[in-house]
Amino acid sequence: MMRVALPLSTLMLSAFSGELLAQGMEALTMTPTEEGGQTYTLSIQILLFMTALSLLPGALLMTTSFARIIIVLAILRQALGTQNTPSNQILIGISLFLTIFIMMPVFQQAYETGLKPYLEEKVTVVEALEGVATPMREFMLGQTRETDLQLFADIGGIGEIESPEKVPLSVLLPAFATSELKTGFQIGFLLFIPFLVIDLVVASVLMSMGMMMLSPLIISLPFKIMLFVLIDGWALVFGTLASSFLV
């Protein structure tokens, strides 16, 4: 017998919609505002909120500092040669906490300009979304290269960008992601060089001693870990990552 498992959110939404219909309430009601906009009923707002929650992981990767941090930490682990230490879960957790630390001023501004007025019922949903998007947009513009913006503007047929403030989100999001990837690999390359030098020195010494059958990684690993610990490498890396987002 085949069992069909429905997501919990779908079941909750179906039960909520059934209750509205049983009470004779309209599922969709649009009310015009004095400014010429429109407001929607609570059921539509809940549906939009649940949809936004499903898109939250993608938004975390595309609009925050998470991508750059996780790329640098993954390259650093590869340079150290410690294989799965730290584990992927630890790297993701560290990246998440650093992202919260770096993005906290932006999140606070988004709360003050968008979410707080909406909770106090001073603005509509559309105005609240615009208030939340404004500080996020400023953050992404500050971290995006003009060449990347112009690249996606040309691909999208927009042409010459008059000012960064007029760049649409459809162009800003991929340009920001491209800039973050480029910056993350640049920082990772600079971190990789000292450990690569240690590997080359150890390999040369082993070759000169005729110990060609011995893997250089076995000998160089303790030296790389010792060097990284002595210079307080984790603090330097985290401090560099945090300061790289200062505009």
Image (cartoon, rainbow, N blue to C red):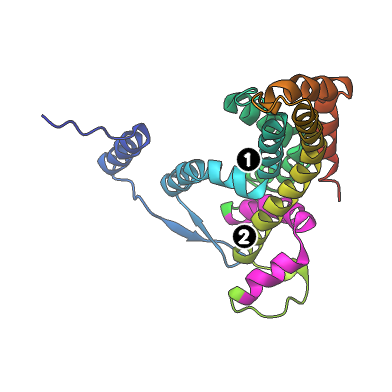
Across and down, in percent, residue 80 comes to 72, 29
Mark closer to the observer (1, 2): 2
Q: Are marks 1 and 2 in contact (CB under 8 Å)?
A: no
Residue sticking out furthest to the right: 231
Please give the name of the residue rendered at 46% of the width and 41% of the height, measured from the top-left corner: 50
Q: Nearer the viewer, residue 123 or 64?
A: 64
Please give the name of the residue rendered at 59% of the width and 56% of the height, measured from the top-left corner: 126
Residue 73: name its quadrant: top right
> Residue under circle 2?
174
Please give the name of the residue rendered at 59% of the width and 74% of the height, measured from the top-left corner: 155
> How far is the residue under mark 1 from the one under mark 2?
31 Å
> Residue under circle 1?
119
Residue 131 visible in the displayed image = no
Residue flagged by tag 2: what amino acid is it? Pro
Residue 62 visible in the displayed image = yes
Q: Secondary structure at mark 2?
A: helix
Going by the image, does 175 lie left or right of 245? Answer: left
Say whether residue 210 is magenta. Answer: no
Residue flagged by tag 1: what amino acid is it? Leu
Q: Nearer the viewer, residue 234 or 24?
A: 234
Q: Secondary structure at mark 1?
A: helix
Q: Examine the rendered structure and indicate whether residue 98 appears above or below residue 178.
A: above
Across and down, in percent, residue 118 comes to 63, 45
* Span shown in magenta: 126-154
- Which quarter of the rendering shows the N terminus? top left
Say whether residue 145 is magenta. Answer: yes
Task: Indicate which disc residue 8 carries.
Answer: none
Labels 1 and 2: the sequence-earlier one: 1
Dominant secondary structure of the residues highlighted in magenta in the image: helix
